[in-house]
Image (spheres, rainbow, N blue to C red):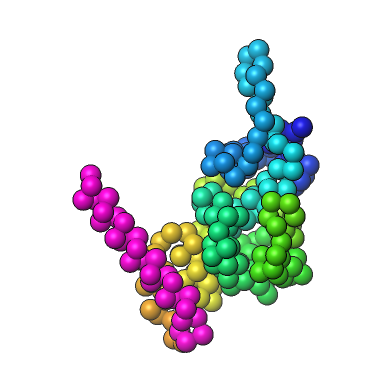
């Protein structure tokens, strides 16, 4: 059995002790939301935590998806909910396809296509690794002060307009996503996606109003 840091080192050739403790925190977020299964052993001074058998693949896929989608709950939903997986796949296709770099990180176009095809297909995220298009994990390059989506939003002036809409949507800024969607010159090809974004905005506002009334 291996610890989470040892598994990340073997999967991505990253030494968390010297290079990126933030990535360990991201991995532990999947432990806390029960996506990752672990085995805990009581020791004299503290508890030792190891990944359960087969969970190295879950950790690999979760961190790969987390490179684009910063919310651990959304990543877990990609594993568990077909509709979220389909939404995420459309976002990945828009943000990454036909790119050789993203925010300065080298991308393999072949691996990007393979990853999207795998998500569109029947690949089991619990037992099969996704193809990895990133030369270096974005979490390592960008660190804890930003993420890939926020970095893309910062470059919105040079993005395709639809990229900006999707980036705002996935980062949870529904108002900004709708604002950008309204500015698209041709909405016919992406009408269903824009309808989904506007529906999410309405539901979010209703939920927020309900919370405000409750408290």
Q: Nearer the viewer, residue 155 or 96?
A: 96
Above or below 107: residue 21 = above
* Magenta-colored segment: predominant secondary structure: helix
Q: Residue at x 61, y 62 (%)?
A: 103
Q: Nearer the viewer, residue 21 or 175?
A: 175
Residue 179 relative to residue 168: left or right: left
Furthest residue in direction left, as rendered: 213
Give yes or no for residue 65 being in the magenta stretch: no
What x and y, as percent, mark residue 64? 66, 54
- Residue 175 position, x and y percent, is 36, 66
Q: Is residue 138 visible?
A: no
Q: Quadrant of residue 36?
A: top right
Q: How many marks?
A: 0
Front-lying residue, 4 or 168: 4
Q: Quadrant of the N terminus?
A: top right
As drawn, 23 above or below 97: above
Q: Is residue 200 magenta?
A: yes
Quick check: can you spot residue 89?
yes
Q: 21 left or right of 196? A: right
Query: Relative to 122, does residue 12 appear above or below in the rendering?
Result: above
Q: Nearer the viewer, residue 84 or 201?
A: 84
Q: Residue furthest top?
A: 44
Spot occupied by residue 5 in the image (x, y as percentages of width and height) = 70, 36
Q: Is residue 173 left or right of residue 49?
A: left
- In the picture, measured across the screen, residue 160 lies left or right of residue 97, that is left
Q: Position of residue 22 (x, y in %)?
A: 59, 40
Task: Say which quarter of the image contains residue 16.
Answer: top right
Residue at 21% x, 50% y: name it. 213
Q: Which residues are magenta?
A: 187-215
């Amino acid at each position: 059995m291996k610890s989470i840091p040892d598994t990340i080192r073997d999967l991505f050739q990253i030494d968390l002790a010297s290079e990126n403790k933030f990535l360990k925190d991201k991995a532990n977020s999947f432990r806390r939301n029960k996506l990752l299964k672990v085995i805990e052993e009581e020791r004299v001074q503290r508890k030792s935590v190891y990944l359960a058998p087969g969970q190295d693949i879950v950790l690999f896929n979760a961190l790969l998806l987390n490179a684009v989608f910063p919310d651990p709950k959304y990543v877990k939903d990609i594993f568990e909910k077909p509709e979220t997986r389909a939404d995420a796949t459309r976002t990945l296709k828009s943000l990454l396809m036909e790119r050789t770099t993203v925010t300065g990180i080298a991308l393999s176009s072949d691996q990007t296509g393979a990853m999207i095809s795998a998500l569109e297909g029947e690949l089991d995220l619990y037992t099969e690794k996704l193809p990895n298009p990133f030369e270096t994990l974005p979490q390592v390059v960008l660190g804890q002060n930003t993420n890939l989506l926020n970095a893309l939003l910062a470059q919105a002036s040079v993005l395709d307009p639809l990229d900006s809409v999707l980036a705002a949507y996935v980062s949870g800024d529904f108002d900004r996503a709708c604002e950008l969607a309204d500015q698209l010159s041709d909405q016919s090809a992406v009408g269903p996606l824009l309808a989904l974004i506007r529906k999410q905005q309405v539901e979010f506002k209703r939920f927020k109003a309900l919370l405000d009334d409750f408290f």
